[in-house]
């Protein structure tokens, strides 16, 4: 029907459909006020596809409405597409909001949890406001979202706020189009919403005097100031909090959590407080204060007064600002920085269900500051840093998830990518949306595996994606690979997914594809994947790889010369073993590497009891898989430099080696490269240089820096050779080793000096948390058309 035929007396009616993150962000109220202010009639509503509206009135005014729709949208809205079609006017002059209806096909997007907005903070601090000091204050522009959503469309009944019936006052605000809480689904107040309580470790009253009613927060703050360990229920799980200045309690928390050295994150009141602890440049300040409120990794200032046990021997500190009203109130009451670390023991996933708190945290916390709003899905704090003025995500979770990532790939068939094993994430993708999951953790126990499988089901339901293609790592023992295999065999746990098509994606190809997708690029590039371990196509363990890669495939064009990993996974936990095999490679049969001979070196002396048998094991190939891993090369250098012989968290030796290095040192060791492709790089040349420099009395800080520069140099040399042979001028850097900023800066500087275009990660981590996105784009590219 033509536009003209629809007109009745100069009036038009236009149907409008808005797609993107438009539910739970105040979009309907925004449309309502816009339409009523323009005097248009019609209706607006949520449905499974997003927001729909019909507007009726003068054609020029309807045009004005459509222009303002995108231009003035509420702050949390992410509009992806607006489509319109003409309708027959029906004479309506009033405007209404239609109630939500559950749809059959769900294409809507759920927004991420958002930090308390300035308007809510002002009310929180206003003694005259009825929500004064109320720890659950929120509005259309802020508050919990992903962590409370059970289903879509996003409405209170389908969130964990469902059990709380709004009081008269809240209901009136909720219904008032002029109010900031108009249709704010989690809105509440002290009369009708969740309430805080302070419990002792066994659910009894807190130690000491039972707190006066209505004051659990003040009592909790008092416990913190007294040096107690407090469990605090947050948005995506429980944290453990202690006074960040309390040496004894921080050390006690480490002992109770069985967490030896891995740094704790610290919450501070504001950017000014952050600047008293760390160097905070403008980019970092922007990240700290963003509504996503991640933990930001920052260079630490000396003499800040924090307890040594907060981040032992670490030059960096992870800081975050309060992101819930409860945090704001607590940090104000404590009046100083507070450790806020994940509520778990060692490497277990964080606790988020009230029913498991006593059992899992009862031995750790002295008291529990909790509440009666359930957490639907466990979500860790996100971790980011600023790199060259841009955000670089290290762990992507609360505040970011479940926003889809825009990538250049179109997913013609729905894809599930199962990720790797460490720092696990999965990715569900359909059409132009890649939903990378929240950080699940290391997939090596029943609890994380349950999070993984339940997370996939939750995302499938929220975004209505039934995968037809399932991508997985090539490692046969990863639980994520086994899950994919089970799907294809129609195991009952995977009901409804039988018969999916499997696509195996090599680990380092997935890293490079992830970096390409992160940059909306498709290659081909010279991909440099430097990480700990990943299963290679030849059955050895890769990790120091140069791949000529695009999204569809790759060729292995170069790699570190493989060495044995004596004891397999034990060699990852005991870097001195890598020192032994690298010394053996650097001095074959010679006095340093030999069974009897490494006597001159401290690392050999410290480990002399097992040194000969480890070398024998490696020599005979007993439980000693070959690896070209760059992470293991860093381990070897760290052990030889006396940084550490064993680790208690992943990547610890390399992290401490980076911190040891003198950033001002410009010298670099050289590594031999032999062709033809695949080029072989003699990593042990760097080890020999380390030994000789140390023997010459060079300071370890200088040696560590020359080693870093040497790795940057071998990467550059290799890329120059490959550019000559392949004519490619773009290099993509991925893999967990590039979390090392000293290495990343040195590598980029060298590559750029030689005219290379360099792609690095920003929106997804360079570590294995980014693998699922890489797998998804590879699977989609292979199955195009
Ligand atoms: Zn607000
Ligand atoms: Zn209320
Ligand atoms: Zn990896």
Image (tube, grey):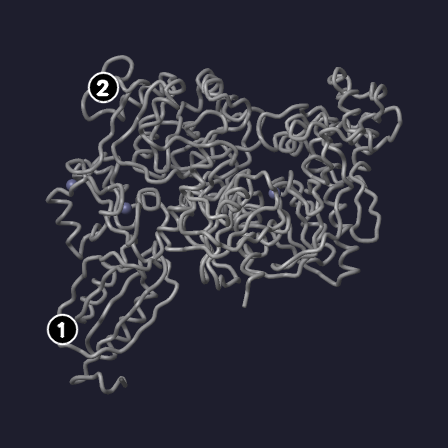
- Relative depth, front residue between 432 and 242: 432
Q: Position of residue 14 (x, y in %)?
A: 25, 75
Q: Position of residue 587 (x, y in %)?
A: 86, 30
Q: Which mark's residue is nearer the viewer, 1 or 2?
A: 1
- Relative depth, front residue between 185 and 445: 445
Q: Is residue 525 left or right of residue 420?
A: right
- Relative depth, front residue between 556 and 540: 540
Q: Visible in this render: residue 7?
A: yes
User: Ligand 2: which quarter?
Assistant: top left
Q: Is residue 428 left or right of residue 528?
A: left
In the rendered view, would you say 775 is above or below 381?
A: below
- Disc 1 C-beta below 8 A from ligand 1: no
Image quadrant for the C terminus?
Answer: bottom right
Q: Residue at x 37, y 18 (%)?
A: 228
Q: Position of residue 396 (x, y in %)?
A: 47, 44
- SS at badge 2: loop
Q: Which residue is mark 1?
A: 92
Q: Which residue is mark 2?
A: 211
Image quadrant for the N terminus?
Answer: bottom left
How packed mark 2 is, by other alpha carbons closer than 10 Å (few <14, some 14-19, many 20 or more), is some
- Disc 2 C-beta below 8 A from ligand 2: no
Identify the image quadrant of residue 525: bottom right
Mark earlier in primary sequence (1, 2): 1
Q: Which mark is residue 71?
A: none
The CA span between labels 1 and 2 is: 57 Å
Q: Residue at x 83, y 33 (%)?
A: 586
């Amino acid at each position: 029907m033509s536009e003209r035929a629809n007109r009745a007396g100069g009036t038009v009616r236009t149907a409008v459909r808005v797609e993107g993150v438009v539910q739970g962000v105040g979009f309907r109220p925004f449309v309502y006020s816009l339409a009523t202010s323009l005097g248009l009639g019609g209706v607006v509503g949520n449905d499974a596809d997003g927001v729909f509206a019909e507007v009726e009135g003068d054609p020029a005014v309807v045009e004005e409405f459509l222009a303002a729709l995108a231009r003035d949208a509420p702050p949390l809205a992410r509009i992806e597409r607006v489509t319109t079609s003409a309708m027959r006017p029906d004479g309506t002059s009033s405007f209404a909001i239609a109630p939500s209806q559950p749809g059959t096909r769900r294409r809507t997007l759920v927004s991420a949890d958002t930090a308390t907005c300035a308007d809510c903070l002002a009310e929180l601090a206003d003694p005259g406001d009825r929500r004064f000091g109320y720890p659950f204050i929120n509005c259309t522009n802020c508050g919990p979202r992903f962590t409370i959503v059970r289903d879509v469309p996003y409405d209170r009944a389908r969130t964990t706020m469902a059990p709380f019936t709004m009081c008269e006052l809240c209901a009136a605000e909720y219904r008032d189009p002029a109010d900031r809480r108009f249709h704010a689904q989690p809105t509440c107040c002290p009369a009708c919403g969740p309430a805080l309580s302070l419990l002792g470790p066994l659910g009894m009253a807190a130690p000491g005097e039972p707190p006066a009613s209505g004051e659990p927060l003040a009592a909790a703050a008092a416990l913190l100031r007294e040096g107690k360990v407090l469990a605090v229920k947050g948005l995506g799980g429980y944290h453990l909090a202690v006074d960040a200045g309390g040496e004894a309690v921080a050390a006690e928390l480490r002992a109770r959590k069985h967490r030896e050295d891995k740094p704790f994150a610290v919450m501070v009141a504001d950017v000014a407080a952050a600047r008293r602890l760390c160097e905070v440049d403008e980019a970092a300040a922007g990240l700290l204060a963003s509504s996503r409120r991640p933990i930001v990794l920052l260079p630490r200032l000396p003499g800040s007064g924090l307890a040594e046990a907060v981040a032992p021997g670490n030059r960096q500190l992870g800081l975050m600002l309060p992101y819930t009203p409860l945090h704001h109130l607590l940090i104000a009451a404590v009046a100083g920085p507070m450790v806020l670390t994940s509520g778990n023991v060692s490497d277990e996933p964080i606790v988020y269900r009230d029913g498991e708190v006593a059992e899992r945290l009862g031995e750790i916390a002295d008291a529990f500051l909790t509440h009666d709003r359930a957490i639907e899905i466990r979500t860790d704090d996100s971790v980011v840093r600023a790199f060259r003025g841009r955000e670089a995500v290290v762990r992507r979770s609360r505040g970011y998830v479940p926003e889809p990532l825009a990538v250049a790939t179109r997913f013609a068939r729905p894809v599930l990518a199962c990720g790797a094993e460490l720092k696990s994430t999965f990715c569900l993708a359909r059409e132009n949306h890649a939903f990378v999951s929240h950080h699940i953790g290391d997939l090596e126990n029943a609890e994380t595996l349950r999070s993984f499988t339940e997370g996939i089901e939750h995302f499938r339901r929220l975004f209505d994606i039934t995968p037809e293609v399932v991508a997985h790592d090539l490692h046969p023992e990863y639980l994520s690979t086994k899950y994919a295999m089970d799907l294809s065999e129609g195991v009952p746990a995977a009901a409804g997914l039988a018969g999916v098509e499997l696509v195996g994606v090599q680990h380092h190809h997935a890293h490079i594809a992830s970096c390409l997708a992160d940059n909306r690029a498709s290659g081909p590039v010279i991909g440099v994947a430097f990480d700990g371990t990943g299963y290679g196509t030849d059955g050895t363990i890769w990790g120091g790889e140069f791949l000529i890669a695009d999204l569809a495939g790759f060729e292995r064009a170069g790699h570190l010369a493989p060495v044995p990993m004596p004891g397999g996974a034990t060699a990852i936990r005991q870097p001195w073993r890598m020192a032994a095999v690298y010394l053996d490679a650097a001095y074959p049969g010679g006095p340093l590497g030999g069974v009897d001979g490494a006597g001159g070196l401290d690392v050999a002396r410290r480990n002399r009891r097992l040194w000969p048998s480890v070398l024998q094991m490696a020599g005979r190939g007993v439980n000693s898989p070959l690896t070209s891993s760059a992470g293991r090369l860093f381990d070897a250098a760290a052990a030889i430099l006396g940084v550490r012989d064993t680790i208690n968290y992943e990547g610890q030796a390399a992290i401490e080696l980076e911190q040891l290095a003198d950033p001002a040192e410009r010298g670099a060791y050289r590594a031999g490269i032999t062709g033809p492709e695949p080029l072989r790089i003699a990593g042990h040349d760097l080890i020999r240089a380390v030994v000789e420099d140390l023997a010459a009395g060079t300071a370890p800080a200088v040696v560590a820096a020359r080693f870093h520069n040497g790795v940057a140099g071998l990467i550059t040399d290799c890329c120059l050779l490959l550019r000559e042979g392949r004519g490619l001028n773009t290099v993509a850097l991925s893999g967990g080793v590039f979390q090392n900023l000293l290495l990343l800066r040195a590598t980029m500087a060298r590559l750029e000096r030689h005219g290379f275009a360099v792609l690095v990660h920003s929106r997804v981590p360079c570590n294995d948390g980014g693998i699922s996105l890489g797998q998804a784009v590879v699977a989609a590219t292979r199955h195009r058309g």
